[in-house]
Image (cartoon, rainbow, N blue to C red):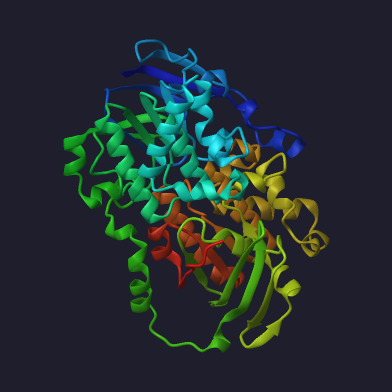
Amino acid sequence: MIVFDNVSLSVTESSNTLPLNENQIEANINLSSIDILKNVSFNVGKGEIVLLLGQSGCGKTSILRIISSLIPNFYEGKVTGNIEILGRKTLDYAKPDEIGYVMQNPKNQFFVSGIAEEMVFTAQNLGLPKSEILNRMDQSLDALNARFLLDKGLVRKLSLGEKQKVAILETMIANPKIILLDEPSSNLDFSEVLKLKEQIIRWKKAGQTVIIAEHRLYYLWDIADKAFLFEKGTLLKNLNKGDLTKLTPKEISQFGLRSISETDNDPTLLLDYFKNKQQITLSDKDYIVINNFSTKWHKHDFCIEQISFLPQKINAIVAPNGTGKSMLLECLSGLYKFKADITEKGVKVKIKDFVKNNFLVFQDPNYQLSQVTALDEVLISFSREEHDKFDAKTLEQKAITILEDLNLKNQIYNHPLSLSGGQKQRLLLACAIASKKNMLLDEPTSGLDANSMNYLSKQLRSMIAKYNITIIIVSHDVEFIKACADTITNLELKI
């Protein structure tokens, strides 16, 4: 069904980097061709579930884009080697009933504002009868228990996890022969991930091929037929079903992969985990306490009676999709007005003074990146006092040091929007560090591999000690929360 034979992909670096000044020229930036994939060969059969594994930036998304014909028809790239998909070359455009693609960032594939209209958009463009479209829509909504999404009306009212679910439903309704999923669980809560697993099994039983680029593996490992492990654009391991079942947890960790244990990723066990971890009892005067929090979101009231955080610690918030976690962080950063009584270590604090000391890193980093290079993003994040205190060259070196500490040394002069999802997240962390403010992190491990997740955990711990800041995180990533958080709050209210 899919054959890659010595396939390579290269792009010109000039499309990803913009040398704008003398410092960049002195950095000896090479504007020649960059190899994204190198002599990749594999076969995928009908009805197989295939995993694409590897660290961020190793080429997984590029594989999906080639299969879907987005490369080279939409994204730039020179493809060499022999490719055959559904009996023909993939460089032709693929129809949506042949290949369906759920992107890592679902908003990149949405065309209309209404939720129901978006779900059926692809099927409508296939020219299917209305009765058939409505029948498929009903079946898909029931399969994922997702009828509640229709009540929200507009796509913009959805959380990113809910948008991801809409993208999955749209693909289900189109019913393609090949389904491509790029980090499909990155913004889904635990229960939704398990529903997605059941749907993937149904696709397989129907003879549909599913190829998944994913870091969170606990819901896929036991149902996968094959796994291709990539490293820097090279196919390092071609693992069949037997190979997957024989791998030990130690070997999985050595490959830089995340835990495959469902128990390790079950959020219902987190509260007990933190009760056992917490050895001392603290009073309200030790916390940042927010009482009687209230705001409005699309004419809906969103209220929290009380929520508290430990200063100079990492505080995690967990809750299902659509609960209001992101809305809470956006309010605490000053993006939206809210009412609340706030005390820090027993002292009352004005809302305006509280929010001005918080730096929000969005769930979707594309909303925050506005500069021409990664370095520029960090430079504009320094306070006015920092700019007055240091000369331009000193401040630039401070910014470069921060970027290097977050493993972004090779991205300093690249355009921020050319970075991978994980790299964009780390770039915004660099901006937060430069601001010297408390950090509000919305799903910071979305798109991060195991090594990057562990690295980020260590970086956040060191930031607490080095910069004396408070960090508040909302996340579905149980592994990450266990690795770095000091406190946990289960937010159960819904907007």
Name the residue nearer the viewer: 30 or 347.
347
Q: Is residue 160 above or below residue 310?
A: above
Look at the image and tell me in which quarter the N terminus lies. top left
Which image quadrant for residue 405? Answer: bottom right
Residue 160 position in % (x across, y down): 54, 48
Residue 167 position in % (x across, y down): 49, 38
Residue at the right extreme of this rendering: 388
Residue 171 position in % (x across, y down): 44, 32
Q: Is residue 203 above or below residue 448?
A: above
Which image quadrant for residue 241? Answer: top left
Q: What residue appears at the point 33 percent right and 78 percent down from the top-left corner?
A: 276
Task: Report the label total.
Answer: 0
Q: Is residue 82 above or below residue 414?
A: above
Q: What residue appears at the point 64 percent right and 60 percent down from the top-left corner?
A: 330
Tell whether 301 sits left or right of 8: right
Name the residue nearer the viewer: 455 or 487.
487
Which image quadrant for residue 296? Answer: bottom right
